[in-house]
Image (cartoon, grey):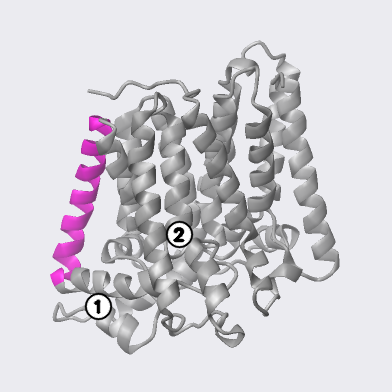
Amino acid sequence: MLLTARRVWAGLWLMAALLSCLALGFAVAGDLSVVRLWRNILHWRVGSESWLLLQRALELLPSNGDDLYQVVYFENGIKLSYPPSALLLWQAAASACRQCSAQTLMSTLNAIGLWLTLAIPFVMSAELLAGTWARRASRADRALIVAGVVLLCAAYYPLALANALGQVQAWLNALFALAFLAFSRQRHMVSGVALGVMVLVKPYAALLVLWAALRGHRRLVVAALATIGAGLAVSLAIYGIDSHFGYFRMAAVLSERGESMYANQSINGLLNRLFLAPEQIRWEHTAPPPYHPAVAIGTMAALVSGTATALWWPRRRAAAGTSCDLAFAAVTMLICSPIGWEHYYPMLLPLYAIFLAETPARADRTEIALLLASTVLTGMFLAPVARIESRPWSILQSYQLAGAVLFLLALARRIRMSGARRLQPAA
């Protein structure tokens, strides 16, 4: 298959049109869709999911340095899954504007997240226009590629969802996109700082820092560890060591139970929906799903085997240390983590772009087919499927997970064939 700029923008427009048609259909039927999400965002009817959690946790913070998570999570049933260092976000915002109300701070943080989201189409456009097949493209074709990227991002359900919920994940999705762009441009220190900030809010991103260490990207690792160390030092000074140990105790419970509702598009979510009774497959505001040994064992097996594969298997290939290799680790991290909410999935968008940008002009049809199918599956919301309660049909709710797995297969195929460009580790 010959890959050209014209075929790329046509594919982007086609995927955006498909996702938009699905969204319009569900909107007419009265179901939640990306159309309704953007309407709420434009009218500024958005949630404050993450910020309310951080605010409530700080209100309950023990003044004597005792374990925050014992009070918040185990005694009050507030499902705070962030580490203590994430509380610095809210505390910094409150300190910057002491006269501002909590609602004003939340609205401001949501607005920043919405502006940061613009980094995702920017990164995607920059990566796609750098592709070898795009260098001789006409100005019209290049403009249509950028327009296609914007339309695809607008129609991509998880991207709108992160902002509509008022999630700090909107910040993290943009931060990951910028980290990935910096890495692909060999700006490893910038990438390391961005990943270090991510770790302070969502520690699962530490897998990517470990990946960089094993691949010899020393500048990235040093920058990431310096950022993490500085944030952790401040967090320890403010919240005490007991709260940090308490976080690991809470994370141990979370890692074996995860979440059962359809929005958890990780392997843990799939296992919960397969093994738990239908009445247990729902969101509980004050408690995780009940313990099930098959879910706990399966989640741990997926996490260990997935991490080992992502860290060690590509090292034997010529693609080791490349953007494609990093993407393989990032997708593995997403699907093998105990919780992989729908609004985590926008991190795939820049990965799609770099994968396509590094595709040679004589493209592999199988890779392109897997990429297209993955983008559509991860970018849509199927309202009727979300209402399924009976087993084993609840497995259909993991369609976004299936899309991520398809992309993982495309990345594995690329790595196995060692078609990605080799990047030399920075000194």
Label 2 packing within 10 angstroms: few (<14), some (14-19), many (20+)? many
Which residue is depicted at the point 25% across and 74% down? 249
Give the overall secondary structure of the magenta segment. helix
Magenta highlight range: 217-241
Residues tagged 1 and 2 counted as in contact (Cβ below 8 A): no
Left or right: where 362 falls relative to 197: right
What type is the residue that disc 1 sits on?
A: Leu
Residue 76 appears at what percent x and percent y?
A: 35, 88
Along the line of sight, which residue is nearer the eye, 222 or 306? 306
- Label 2: which residue? 168
Q: Is residue 201 above or below residue 425?
A: below
Query: Does dot 1 land on a helix, a strand or a loop?
Result: helix
Residue that lies at the very extreme toward the top in this rendered image: 136
Identify the mark at residue 260; answer none if there is no mark.
Answer: none
Instruction: Compute the Cα span from label 1 to label 2.
Output: 20 Å
Residue 157 visible in the snapshot: yes
Which residue is depicted at the point 51% across and 59% down? 110
Label 1 packing within 10 angstroms: few (<14), some (14-19), many (20+)? many
Residue 75 appears at what percent x and percent y?
A: 31, 89
Left or right: where 140 falls relative to 417: right
Q: Earlier in the sequence, mark 1 or mark 2?
A: 1
What type is the residue that disc 2 sits on?
A: Val
Residue 229 falls within the magenta-colored stretch: yes
Residue 388 appears at what percent x and percent y?
A: 70, 75
The quadrant the N terminus occupies is top right
Residue 130 falls within the magenta-colored stretch: no
- Label 1: which residue? 68
Query: Does dot 2 land on a helix, a strand or a loop?
Result: loop
